[in-house]
Amino acid sequence: MNPKVREPFVRITKRDGLASWRGWLIRLISLILALAVSAIVIYAMIKLNPLKVYAAMWEGAFGSEKRSWVTLRDTMMMLCIGVGLAPAFKMRFWNIGAEGQILIGGIATAAVLIYCGNSMPTWALLLTSFVVSSIAGAIWGVVPAFFKARFGTNETLFTLMMNYVAIQLTSYCVALWENPFGSNTVGVINQQTRAGWFPSLLGQQYMLNVILVLVLAVSMYIYLRYSKQGYEISVVGESERTARYIGISVRRVIVRTMMISGAICGLAGFLAVSGASHTISTSTAGGRGFTAIIVAWLAKFNTFVMILIAALLVFLEKGAMQIASQYNLNDFASQMITGIILFFILGSEFFINYRLVFRGKKEAK
Amino acid sequence: MKKVIALLLALTLVFALAACTAKNPEASPSAEASATPSADAAAVKIGVILVHDENTGYDAAHIEGIKKAAATAGIADDQIVWKYNVGEDEGCYDTATDLVEQGCTYIFSDSYGHQSYMQQAASENADVTFVSMTGDTAALSKLPNFKNAFTHTFESRYVSGVVAGMKLKELVDAGTVAAKNKNADGTIKIGYVGAYPYAEVVSGYTAFYLGVKSIVENVAMTVSYTNSWYDPTAEAEAANQLISAGCIILSQHADSTGAPSACEAALKSGTAVYCIGYNVDMLSVAPTSALTSSQNDWSVYYTYAFNCALKGEDIATDWSEGYATGANMISALGASCAAGTDAKVAEVEAALKDGTLNIFDCSKFTVDGAAVTTYLAIDTDGDWVGDTGEAIANGVFSESTLRSAPYFGLRIDGITELTK
C-alpha cells in the first residue's frame, strides 16, 4: 500500500464474528434511537406528547382482546408469506412474486368457496381450498423457476411480471363474480351460510390461522436446518458452482424450492380469503408479498425470528392506524412515524455487518 | 445463543396465546353488559367509517353533515370515533368490529362497497346498529340492526341539469354551438363522467339528462366510466375525451375535481365547454366553466339518526328524503350561468318540493323507442318477480320509494354509455 495516501476521515470495514448478543444490543439501541427521533418529529410537527402517541400505538395493536387477535392474525399472515419466501431467498432466488402467488391462491380459494359453497361440507371445502390454493401458488412459483433453471432468465423480473398477470386475473375474477352486479366488488362470500370459512377453534375466530402458520413455520425451520434438501438450498445459495461440483442438480433444486415457496405463498392466499377476509380483490395481498421480503431477510430466514419482525411490522401498521383515528391525523403523518422506525431498524443491520473506522484509530483486531 | 432466543420467542408466543384464550370467558359478559341500549345522551357513542378523508368532496360532505348533526342533536366530539380511508374490502369489517369494541352503539359507513362487510358485522353484533349509507340490502337482509339511507341525489342532479340546460340554450341562441358539437342527427352533444355502471349512477345521469332536456329538447349524452369513486387522473382523462369528442356540457358522478379542472383548461384554451360538479362547489378550481354542483346535505339524515339514537328509538330501515326536507340542493350559481337561471331554478325547486314535478315521468323518455310501462325494480333472487313491488304507477317511475338506494337502471334513448 502506498503510505502517502491520506487516510479518509471515516471508512467502513466488514465485521466478522460479532457475538449475537451484541447484534441484538445494536438492534435495541436503534429501536430506542428511532423512538427518540420519532418523538422529536411528533412533537415538532403535530405538537403532541410523544409518550401518549406511543401509548396510542400500543392501544391500537393490543388495546382489546379483539385487537390483539386481529394483530395476531395479521402477524400470522405476514409470517406465512415470510416462511414461504425464506427457502427461495436462502437459495438467492429473488422471488418478488409472492404478491401474485398469494393472489392466485386467493382466487383458487374464492373459486372453491363460490362454486362449491353449497354442495360440500365445511371440512371438505377447507381441505379442497387448501390443496387447490397451494397447487395454484406452486404453479405460479414454478413457472419463473423453470425458465430460470432452463434458460437462465432473470427471476426478479419474471416473478415481478407474474404479479401483474395475477393482479389482472384477480380483476377479471372480481368482474366475473361481482356481487351485486355493477358494484365491482365480490363482497363477502357465502355471507349467510359461512360455508368454507375458518371455524372458530377454542372459541377464537382466528385460532386456526395461528395454528396453521405456526406449524408451517416450525416445519420450515426444520426443513431448512436439518433436512438434506434444506442443505442443498443453502449450498446453491452460497455458490451454484460448488453445488454442481458436489453433484447437486441445481435445476432440480431451483424448481423444487420455488414449488415449495409458491405453494406456501398460495396458502397465504387461502388464509387471507378463507381465514380472514372472506372476499377477494386486488387488495387481498395488499403489498404484503413485498413487505414479507423484509421479514424474511431481516430474520436471516430463521422462521422464529420472523415472528418477531412480522409482529413489529404489523404492530407499526396498527399503531399508525390508531393514532390517525385517535388524534384526527392525516394517515401520512402516522405513516411517517412508521417510516422512521423502519428506517432505523433496517439501518441497524448495516452497523451489525459493518463498522465505521475513524481516522487515527487503529482497527481493532 | 440464537437457539435460546428462538426458544424464548416461541415460549413468549405460546404464553401470549394462552393469555388471550384464558381472558376470553371473562371478557364476553362485560361486553354484553356495556351494549345494553341506553337513552342517556352521554352514553351514545357513534362510529364513523369513511372511504376517504376530508380531501374528497363526497367524504367532506359526510364529515360536515355529521358534525352539523352532532351539534344540533347535542352529541359531544368525544362521542364520535372517526375512521378515515377505510377501503371497500375486509378492512371495513375489521374497522366495524373494532368500533364495536370501542363501545360504539351506532356505526355509519359512507360508501356503497362497505355494505357487505357492515352487514357481516351487523349479523355478529345484534346490540349495535349499523347504517350502510347508500347501501341497498338492509331490508332484504332482515337484520333488525342493519339500515340503509340515501338522499334523493337524482333531484339535485335534475336541478343541476336545468342549470346546464339554461346555459346550453344561451349557447345555442348565441350561435356558439358549432358543427363539431352536434351529432349527425342534429342533437347537441353533452357528456357525463360516471364512476361505476350501476343503478345509483344510472339514476343520477338520467335525471341530469332529463333536466337538460326539459330546457333544450335535442340533446344526446355520452357517459364515460372511470371505475373508481375517486381518481382525479382518470376523471380528467375521461373529461378530456368527452370534450375532444365535442361535448359542450359535462357533468360528473365521481368525487374529484378532475373533470372541472379539465373543463376549465379547455375553456381557457378556446373550447367552449361548461361543467356541473358534484358535492363540492367547483368554482374554486373552475371559476369560469363551472355552473353549479349538485349536492347532498347529509346532516338532515344524521340529525334524524342521532335523535333516534338519543331517544333509544329504532332508525328507519330505509331512509330517503330529498328537496322537500332540505336533504338535497345545488351549490351557488357560477358567474357563467345564463340570465334567468335562478328564477328557473326556483320554479323547478318549488315544483319538486310540492311534488308537482315528477323527474322520471314516463312520458318524458323512451327505451328502445318505446314508452316504459312496467319495471322490475328490485329482483335480487333472479326469479323475474320484483321483491318489493312495481316501480311504475300512473305513468311515473317512482325512484327511491321501494328502498332508499336508487334503482332506476333503465338505459333510456339519447344516452350512450362508453363501456370498455
Image (cartoon, helix red, strand yellow):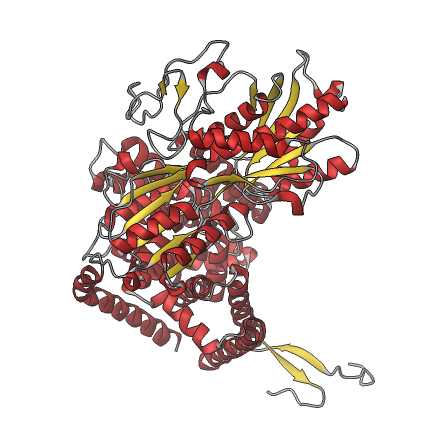
Horizontal and vertical percent position of residue B71: 41, 58
Q: Is residue B193 visible?
A: no
- The structure residue drawn at horizontal position 20% and vertical position 58%, both measured from the top left corner, is B36
Q: Let me know if residue B104 appears in the view.
A: yes
Expressed as whole percent of the image width and height from the top left, the position of residue A253 reads 46, 50
Left or right, B154 with respect to A64, comes to right
Front in this rendered view, residue B76 or B180: B76
Between residues A110 and B101, which one lies in front from this camera angle?
B101
Q: Quadrant of the N terminus of chain B?
A: bottom left
- Give whichever of B390, A69 is nearer the camera: B390
Q: Quadrant of residue B266?
A: top right
Q: Vertical placement of B48 versus A119: above or below?
A: below
User: Is B115 on the left-hand or right-hand side of A356?
Assistant: left
The C terminus of chain B appears in which quarter of the rendering?
A: top right
Residue A139, compared with residue B79, is above or below; it is above
Residue A205 is situated, as x and y percent measured from the top left of the image, at: 25, 54
Which percent across, then down, holds residue B194? 54, 33
Relative vertical location of residue A361 with respect to residue B179 in this rendering, above or below: below
Q: Nearer the viewer, residue A140 or B352?
A: B352
Residue B302 vs A304, above or below: the answer is: above
Kindly identify the residue that appears in the image at 32 percent across and 36 percent down.
B137
